[in-house]
Image (cartoon, rainbow, N blue to C red):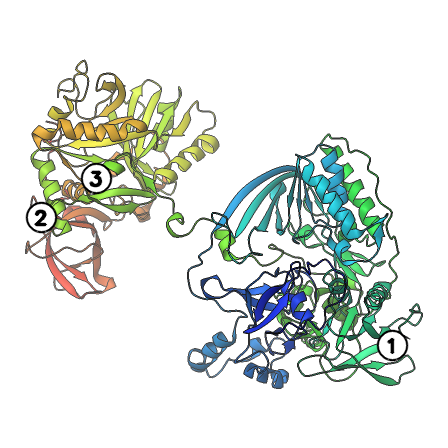
Amino acid sequence: MSDAQINRLAGGAIDRSQSLKFSFDGKTYTGHPGDTLASALLANGVRLIGRSFKYHRPRGVLTAGSEEPNALVELRSGARQEPNTRATTAELFDGLEAQSQNRFPSLKYDLMAINDRFSNFLTAGFYYKTFMWPAAFWEKLYEPVIRKAAGLGSLSLQEDPDSYDKGFLHCDLLIIGGGPAGLAAALTAGRGGARVILADEDFALGGRLNAERFALGDQSGAEWAAQVRAELASLPSVRILTRTTVLGAFDHGIYSAVERVSDHLPLPPEGKPRQILWRIYTKRSLLCAGAIERPIAFENNDRPGIMLAGAMRAYANRWAVTPAQRVAVFTNNDDGHRSAQDLLAKGVDVAAMIDTRADAPRLADCEVLAGAQVINSKGWLGLTSIRVRLADGSERQIDCGALGVSGGWNPNVHLTCHQRGRPQWDASISAFVPGADGPKGLGIAGAANGDFSTAAALRTGHAQAAVLLGELGLKAPEIVLPQAEDAPVNLSPFWHVKHGKGRAWLDQQNDVTVKDVTLAHQENFRSVEHLKRYTTLGMATDQGKTSNIGGLAIMAELAGKSIPEVGTTIFRPPYTPVAMGAFGGRARGKNFHPVRETPSHKWAVEQGATFVETGNWLRAQWFTKPGETHWRQSVDREVGAVRSSVGVCDVTTLGKIDIQGSDAATFLNRVYANAFAKLAVGKTRYGLMLREDGIAMDDGTTARLSEHHFVMTTTTANAVGVYQHLEFVRQCLFPDLDVQLISTTEAWAQYAVAGPNSRALLQKVVDPEFDISNEGFEFMACREITICGGLRARLFRISFSGELAFEIAVPTRYGDALIRRIMAAGAEFGVTPYGTEALGVMRIEKGHAAGNELNGTTTALNLGMGRMVSKKKDSIGSTLSEREGLNTPDALMLVGLKPLDSAAPITAGAHLMSKGTPKDAAHDQGYVTSAAYSPILNSSIGLALLKRGGERMGETLTLTTPLTGADVDVEVVAPQFVDPKGDRLRA
């Protein structure tokens, strides 16, 4: 273990009273609370942290924030291993494990660095020009090698043990960024009584105030930020979200944000998520996201130890760390001088200030090389020296372990682009600023709008908050802002050093160089969008936060244009990478798919039911009795019980739609293919619904409970789709009709009671004043009744099994009690619960079409329901159902199938072939849609769609299954296998 924090300075915002142990690549180091992983590694003298993506060049820390392109590591181990984490934002905690990534076998000795030797062959766009031949090499050689080399971090391939959550927040004003502008705005809005959310990605509010030495009034920047935070925390209308990154700006004032609730802890607290993905609804928003420093490109400017000067200043002031004991600074602006001054104040040896400007200001205690440029660097795994070209053309070597580079600052415009807003060029700061076409209701303040001084950030934060509050009808209070530095921007644009034949790096994660941009220009990929995709500039995980402007400037120079003439790409969500778990939230494992339980579920569990998923529902598939060792035994018993006595099945899952209004009958007449306008009160009718293209959509029954009140049932699978269709018809096609819809699927528990003794059973449940005899309650009748001494209910005489049957519905809260009452009342008849398998067997025996037949390709004609499509009225889909292509002489027709050998199975999906013809697609006669074993017929049976099926009764065909090679001879029969005349269901 190394306790020597050789680069630790005095001061800083770290807690030196505690030491935290952590490891990097198996070696143990120490740090302090308040450190990030990057600051702690730098304090311990670790500069080499990663390898670049393509060439595997050594890379170190470049920045101090979420814009970091280089210092990507894997955190933790085992199932909690997290790849591609920025060391610059990972908070240090005791026991933190970190591993470098994208290297083999080790970070120091990476064999993949051989790619750098072949860089002349791996230039921009090489992947468009190579791997083209020989063709056979792609799958056998090229693709495996590419896949092996692709990616940065690695996955543990174990289940993530942590939980994630999602939430919704509402506010008047969302303030994005907790720097000086954001704090001034939050103070203004909070005191004004607005509901405010202040979100910042850092764990400490203050932004750059925490990284600077200057004062605000008589306080340090960090002290003022802490004071404002304390006041904001005391205001009931203000919510502070630290460790929270606003990811994207969406329509209607909606923003997404991810809060890292427990990433800074070894383990999430019990019952707490690791991260929360927030969906924030706000009336107004204010972007105070600051600015990002940009580098200057020069030969070998990517060595570990070369970093942004502002980041070097932040590490010194906030974390009391220097990347090396002897450093230099390379700049084109006054802010670079500020970095050198702060480093000198911390006791760091600043070897030289290299300023591209001939009139660079002097600097006490440090040599200023005005009009000079850094032209190269040396050092294998870390910087050892730089080569400087002086103003007179001579060259000089300067020994140093770190170099701070400052090419100016770019306002953080990303969120303003998320709705296709285009940034505008501001020549005064040589950077793009937000355009006027950003998200509606979004204001911008501080450095994000190009106002770089602290005083300007405070002023604009207060002023913008006041404007936005005024738009909401709220009055902003006057607040006294502290005095702060108000230095102007003093910058001379300088993008890259023109020297040597080596490579100058722009995008350090994707290994994009000045030469790559030059090659793109030569090959006519000059549009900014083409440049991005041809070179991959800005396509890394940092979205080019530190590289885009440099690349655009070089393209502008090559094209002989200005930067605004060349233009810029825009950004898309998310602002920073997000863990996939955050997007998933709680929707994983059992919670990935919602589970809906029927009212009889608890009772069915008690009976030992086996359940099956039907959509979101869990339905009883069959009920196993003692001694039954195969599911077929249970299903055969259930079918036999229904056919011989009485059975009960929970059919609550069928869609139920309540339809009311004076035009309800007219509405149904238009959505159903068959007539409904004259359906009598107290009657139920089977209906077929068509899509607009004439294809069958769904079938079901609709009951007329009163003159203007109908109840429609749909198949379980199509319950939502049919309801959406009806709403579309009501709102868009026939808005003039007086009709209202509401889904009542969950409101009513419904049971099918079927079998010869079903009436006798229900007479013991239905209150005696209601006559349910065959004369008093005919087939297809419906009625609102009471049961069990006054409980309201609905009774329908409909049958899906082909037996005498009823469906009885009660409010859902009585569903469990009703099934128990039915079972008790039916004990003398041997009432048997049956599940979906027995239900399916009986519907096939009866020839009822279901989901397998209503498969999105069949018409009423195919299903044997062609006569149901009324010619006397217009309805949705009726006209297009008459298209010639849907009514050909050899159209598929629904038929029944029986094997000539009753022991032979019929398989759903098998194809029908005429005897003696080749078994190929050209001779295909149709296919089996549904199949089952019928215990009543002691044979397999099936429903099939057969060409000219109605004309081929009694014909023998061969049923072939290409997957298994099995052939079965079958006879074509009518689809109604049991009680074809319907005498049983009318009994």
Mark 3 lies on a secondary structure that is helix
Question: Could one spot residue 445 in this view of the protein?
Answer: no
Q: Can residue 507 be seen in this view?
A: yes
In the rendered image, residue 932, in percent from the top left (x then y), is placed at: 15, 49
Which residue in the structure is indicated by mark 1?
Answer: 372
Looking at the image, tell me whether mark 1 or mark 3 is earlier in sequence order.
1
**Residue 750 point in image, percent of width and height:** 26, 31
Image coords of residue 716 (percent x, y): 30, 40
Viewer-side residue, 712 vs 751: 751
Determine the residue positioned at 68% across, 55% down.
Answer: 414
Which secondary structure lies at badge 2?
loop
Q: Residue at x 6, y 46 (%)?
A: 937
The mark closer to the camera, 2 or 1, is 2
Where is residue 935 drawn, in percent x and y?
A: 8, 46
When the figure is inspected, residue 100 is found, relative to residue 837, above or below; the finding is below
Q: Is residue 232 above or below residue 179?
A: above
Give the SS element for disc 1: loop
Task: Specify the label residue 396 is tagged with.
Answer: none
Residue carrying label 3: 606
The CA span between labels 2 and 1 is: 94 Å
Query: Left or right: 560 with respect to 800?
Result: right
